[in-house]
Image (cartoon, helix red, strand yellow):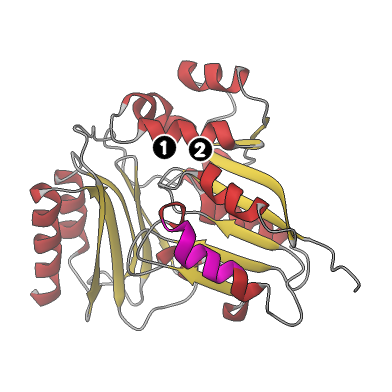
Amino acid sequence: MKMTKAIPVTLLTGFLGAGKTSYLNRLLSQGLPPDSLILVNDFGSINIDAELIEYSDEHIMRLSNGCICCTLGGSLAERLAELLRMSPLPAAIYIEASGIANPTRIADMVRVSPRLNLTEVVCLVDAGQAERYSQDPLVSEVWHQQIRAASRLIINRLPPSLSLPTVLNQLVNHSRARVERLPGAAEMAAIADSRPAPRTTGNGRWHSFSQTFDHAIDGQRLADLLHDYGDVLLRAKGMLQRRGGDKAEVLQLSGGRLNWSPVVKSPAKGQLVCIGANGERLNQLAREIAALNTQY
């Protein structure tokens, strides 16, 4: 029997808000191999990341409401088996992991299949958050895991004139990964809110909640809520219409910095996903955001 050539797999990792989806869209604009397939994992019941990828829907597989590195015997294995039954087979596979995923476990799942060839583990690193994430008890372990597992480190959001933060420079010096600075990183940051990044304390477990909106919302009220709960909220992303606007926009909150940008594909309803430390504070934020859906 003639053996089919193994499908090359690229694993794209990086902590919440590091710029993985933006980087993937940049790869798409440069041209991926024809008939490539993108597998996107988002830690929430609404897969915002998949909606933000500028690629045809039939070439995107979605994994929502969990982290694939924690469900290796379930959703990821099922998806990999499903795509290996496709005809024709994809020319290449790109996996965008959840921002809280341990890439080593995902890489091991790919390596066990003789029909898949893990060619690269790319880790996006937000240089502006390096000092914070290296010390944060909720973040530090997975942030270090992602950097250590990479075969290529891409440093994002570092102005060309600045050197790497000390903690990141130490990690790079002890890494065997190829290190690059993302071109145009300063422009890609596009930060619309310059308030300092919030600090996260405690060792609570990860938790996410999702909210849909039937109408335009008070954008300033939402922004205030996201910042007020910055002690427990690490990431927020969505596609929402603000009052006074004529169409939906993409909301991104990472490292305490809020940005609104034009949407590529308008959703039927507004969508928002928030990720943070499990506990009553995050539950209260969920209730207050849900209340925006009833405020006209």
Image quadrant where residue 91 sits: bottom right
Q: Residue at x 46, y 30 (%)?
A: 144
Q: Which residue is mark 1?
A: 142
* Residue 195 horizontal side relative to residue 172, left or right: left
When the figure is inspected, residue 282 is found, relative to residue 66, above or below; the finding is above
Element type where label 1 sits in the image = helix
Magenta span dominant secondary structure: helix
Q: Is residue 5 visible?
A: yes
Question: Would you say the residues marked 1 and 2 are in contact, meaning their CB atoms lie under 8 Å apart?
Answer: yes
- The amino acid marked with disc number 2 is Gln
The residue lying at 53 percent from left, 70 percent from top is 78
Q: Residue at x 54, y 51 (%)?
A: 106
Q: Report the side of 280 relative to 201 (left or right).
A: left
Is 180 within the magenta? no
Q: Amino acid at mark 1?
A: Val
Q: Is 101 drawn above or below residue 246 in the view shown?
A: above
Would residue 16 appear left or right of 231 to someone viewing this image?
Answer: right
Describe the element under mark 2 as helix, strand or loop.
Answer: helix
Residue 227 figure quarter? top left
Disc 1: CA contacts within 10 A as few (<14), some (14-19) or many (>=20): some
Residue 74 on the magenta span: yes
Q: Which residue is mark 2?
A: 146
Q: Which residues are magenta?
A: 71-80
Q: Position of residue 137 (x, y in %)?
A: 28, 29
